[in-house]
Image (cartoon, rainbow, N blue to C red):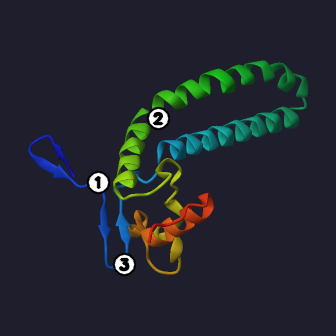
Amino acid sequence: MSFELGDFLFCHAILRLDDAWLWMPYMLSRTRMGIIKYIVKINLLIIILTEMLFFLICAVSGDLSFFNDMQQIFIFFFAIILPIISYLSSGDLLKNAAITEEIYKILGVQEYRRFYINKFSLSCLNPGIETSNKMYVFDFNKVLEAHYKKYGIRQAS
C-alpha cells in the first residue's frame, strides 16, 4: 500500500492466501521487460501490416517501382521515427512496470524481472465461464510453478 494525494491509501495488489489468487490493478501485470517485449511486438506488427498494405496497393495499381522507391522512406520511418514515438508514448507503462516489479519482489518471486503472469489470469484458465472481470485475477501458485520450472529455480520448502 502507498499513500496517495488526499490521505488515501492505494492498494497495489491483493493476495488471497486461501487459494493463492492474486488481484492486480488494471494494466499492472507486466514487468519492464514484458512491456518492452509487448511494445516491440506491436511495432513489428505495425511494420509488417503497413508494408503488406502498401505493397498490395502498389501491386493492384501496377506500379511496383513506386513501392521500391518508397522503401527508403519506410526504412527511415520504421527504424527511427516509430521507435522514438513508441518510447515517448510508453513512459507511464514503464513506470507502472517498475511498480509491478516491486510487487513481485515483495511477494518473494525469484527472477521477478522476467516474471510473466498474463497467461494465468482466471479468464485464460477458465475460458468457458463468464470471466470478463477476472482478467486481472491470477492463480499465483500456477504462475510460480511455471516460472520456476521455466528458469530452473528450486522452490524453498
Where residue 141 sits in the image (x, y, percent)? Answer: 45, 71
Disc 1 and disc 2 in contact, CB within 8 angstroms: no
Q: Quadrant of the C terminus?
A: bottom left
Which quadrant of the view contains residue 15? Answer: bottom left
Asked if the residue under mark 3 is in contact with the one under mark 1, i.e. CB atoms within 8 Å, the reply is: no
Q: Are marks 2 and 3 in contact (CB under 8 Å)?
A: no
Element on which disc 3 rests: loop
Q: Amino acid under label 3?
A: Asp
Crowd rating for badge 3 (residues with CA inside 10 Å; few <14, some 14–19, many 20+):
few
How many residues crowd mark 2 within 10 Å: few (<14), some (14–19), many (20+)? few
Horizontal placement of 63 versus 125: left or right? right
Q: Nearer the viewer, residue 116 or 63?
A: 116
Q: Is residue 105 above or below residue 14?
A: above
Residue under numbered circle 3: 19
Numbered label attached to residue 90: 2
Name the mark nearer the viewer: 2 or 3: 3
Measure how far apart labels 1 and 3 are at the Cα level. Answer: 19 Å
The residue under the point 63% across, 44% down is 41
Q: Residue furthest front?
A: 157
Marks 1 and 2, how far apart at CA: 20 Å
Residue at label 1? 12
- Front residue of 11/40: it is 11
Q: Amino acid at mark 2?
A: Ser
Marks 2/3: CA distance?
Answer: 34 Å
Q: What's under tag 1, amino acid-wise?
A: His
Q: Residue at x 37, y 66 (%)?
A: 22
Q: Which tag, 1 or 2, sits closer to the chain's start?
A: 1
